[in-house]
Amino acid sequence: MMQWQQACNAIMDAKGIVLCAHRHPDGDGIGSQMALFHALKDSGKCVFAHNRDGVPRMYRFISGNEQVSQGESFTPDGTVDLIICLDSANIERIGMPAALFKDRAILDIDHHIHNTRFGDYNLIVPEACATGEIIYKLIGLLQLPLSPEAATAVFTAILTDTCSFRMSTANARVHRLTAALIEAGADPWKVSTEVYESYSRSRLDLLALCLKTLEIRDEGRSAWLFVDHQMKQQANADYEDTEGFIEYARSLDGVEVAVFISPENDSEWKVSFRNKAVVDVSDLAARLGGGGHPYASACVLVGTLAEIRQRVQTTVSDLLE
Ligand SMILES: [Mn+2]
């Protein structure tokens, strides 16, 4: 309970707060950020939101997202004395220069089990299904208002981080919490439509190309998909358009590890992992210099696609043995 009290005190004592989610923010990053943003703003706190990368198109329905500033450098208002980092296992994942954190306290709020506790205060709850779940409880403890906008943002965080309530993390406690969010004004149908049924034609064109790369290895226990620069160009697609592709690999019967490789930028590749059953893919990603959850993780590697596929294959086969 100590860490909850410290987090509450840090927030209550702060004169000005900046909320930061991790690089390439997902639904949990943006949802947690916007929920806390609304709750603090509605209670009269001086609060800003800033991310290294922009809000993905699929999360731009979340009210207030246009107030998130973006970029490599950020000089906040002089009153800001607390930076809250959300859903980020280490400070590097935030992607902001050290100058932002200088002479300001850091509150690290996260549910990654391998979080490095990089904050002056750390609120780390590995059993939470999403950072959004921690934010919901924090809003309650601080007795901050939970507007329909904030409830919608928490709902989005939980929906996306539980893979639409399909993961084992979506337990009875989470479903009860979700009911409370719906009562507070979150609209599940609207959120699902925005997140999962508002894709671009480019994304489907890219998916068609990606599915042709499917390979089943390790005697049916691993499934592999990739996207390369040329495929992205052909489909006129961008970074965001690969969201969710890995689920097609995981969906195969008998597959225990799904692997998806896509360009991170001109020289680096992002390798994503998902599990089914018992394999811990956070361990897999950690062996390759990355991290994440036991059920979803990733790393970034440099090299040719062929080299990376070989290197990752060795690691996957090792783990499955
Ligand atoms: Mn998360």
Image: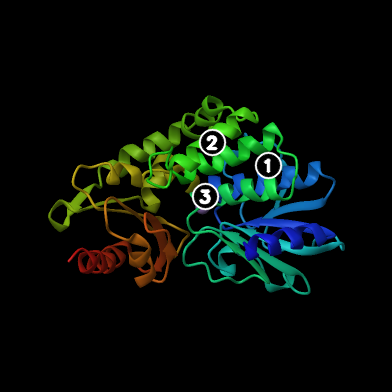
Identify the image quadrant of the C terminus. Answer: bottom left
Dot 3: element: loop
What's the amino acid at mark 3?
A: Ala
Q: Position of residue 185 (x, y in %)?
A: 64, 28
* Identity of the residue drawn at 74% across and 44% down: 39
What's the amino acid at mark 2?
A: Thr
Q: Position of residue 182 (x, y in %)?
A: 58, 29
Compared to residue 284, the image places residue 149 above or below, namely above
Mark 3 residue crowding within 10 angstroms, few (<14) / some (14–19) / many (20+): many
Dot 2: element: helix
Q: What's the colour scheme?
A: rainbow
Instruction: Look at mark 3 in the image and give the residue it sits on.
Output: 130
Foreground tag (1 vs 2): 2
* Identity of the residue drawn at 87% across and 62% down: 79
Distance between the alpha carbons at the discs numbered 1 and 2: 22 Å
The answer to which of 172 and 157 lies nearer the viewer is 172
Disc nearer the start of the sequence (3/1): 1
What's the amino acid at mark 1?
A: Asn
Instruction: Look at mark 1 in the image and give the residue it sits on.
Output: 65
* Identity of the residue drawn at 67% across and 39% down: 150
The answer to which of 102 and 54 lies nearer the viewer is 102
Classify residue 317 as left or right of residue 284: left
Distance between the alpha carbons at the discs numbered 3 and 1: 19 Å
Residue 60 in sight: no
Instruction: Look at mark 2 in the image and give the residue it sits on.
Output: 178
* Identity of the residue drawn at 35% across and 72% down: 287
Q: Judge: label 3 CB < 8 Å from ligand 1.
A: yes
Disc nearer the start of the sequence (1/2): 1
In which image quadrant can residue 96 be found?
A: bottom right
Dot 1: element: helix
Identify the image quadrant of the N terminus. Answer: bottom right
